[in-house]
Image (spheres, grey):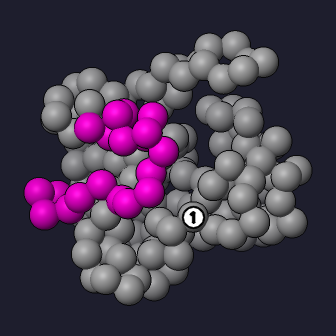
């Protein structure tokens, strides 16, 4: 992942988090402690997703909260409930081959959008590791995608 760079236009807290994650090789930053107004402090597992830019062809790193489903990782394309999908999701629609760093473990994966009963089941899992997703869904007309990252062996 050395040629990859942080995605542009990330909020400052995400830049700080990703830089800590990267500079420590994943020993610091995997478990992210966050506090939001009107919510208790939470510790959430986070990974670094590297996608290929759909327009630029460059590799971009995005720090994201995640859950597990078997050997696969679950991420959610919420963008805080914005009306449009996040850039990383649009990138994986164009190229599903991604790299993932979870703690110190780096692996290649193939991204896919969960649908139907699988999406419903994984959405409930996502609400366990990050309950604010429910608020984000209420804020937007779009169905927030749940993405499965299947490791490539």
Quadrant assignment, res 97: bottom left
Residue 119 appears in the rendering: no
Instruction: Determine which residue is flagged by label 1.
Output: 86
Instruction: Give the residues drawn in magenta, as a range.
Output: 1-19
Classify 10 Å Cα crowding around label 1: few (below 14), some (14-19), many (20 and above): some
- Residue 42 occupies which quadrant of the picture? top right
Q: Residue at x 52, y 28 (%)?
A: 44
Count up the numbered dots: 1
Residue 34, compared with residue 81, is above or below; it is: above
Q: Is residue 54 magenta?
A: no
From where the camera sits, is residue 19 visible?
yes
Q: Position of residue 29 (x, y in %)?
A: 33, 28
Quarter of the rendering containing residue 2:
bottom left
Which structural element holds mark 1? loop
Residue 64, given in percent of the width and then of the height, sits at 47, 46
Q: Is residue 6 left or right of 10 when viewed as pictured?
A: left
In the image as oriented, which residue stretches furthest toward the left? 2
From the viewer's perspective, tell me whether residue 93 is left or right of residue 119: left
Image location of residue 138, percent across then percent down: 88, 50
The vertical placement of 63 against 6, above or below, is above
Q: Horizontally, is 20 left or right of 65 in the view?
A: left
Q: Quarter of the image containing the C terminus? A: bottom left
The one of 24 and 153 positioned closer to us in this rendering: 24
């Amino acid at each position: 992942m050395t040629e990859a760079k942080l995605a542009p236009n990330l909020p400052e807290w995400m830049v700080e988090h990703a830089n800590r994650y990267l500079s420590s090789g994943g020993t610091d930053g995997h478990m992210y402690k966050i506090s939001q107004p009107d919510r208790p402090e939470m510790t959430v597992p986070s990974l670094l997703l590297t996608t290929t830019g759909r327009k630029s062809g460059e590799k971009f790193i995005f720090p994201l909260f995640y859950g597990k489903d078997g050997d696969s990782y679950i991420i959610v394309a919420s963008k805080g409930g914005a009306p449009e999908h996040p850039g990383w999701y649009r990138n994986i629609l164009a190229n599903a081959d991604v790299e993932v760093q979870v703690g110190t473990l780096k692996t290649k994966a193939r991204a896919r959008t969960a649908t139907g009963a699988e999406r419903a089941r994984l959405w409930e899992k996502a609400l366990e590791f990050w309950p604010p997703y429910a608020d984000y869904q209420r804020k937007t007309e779009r169905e927030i995608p749940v993405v499965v990252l299947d490791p490539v062996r």
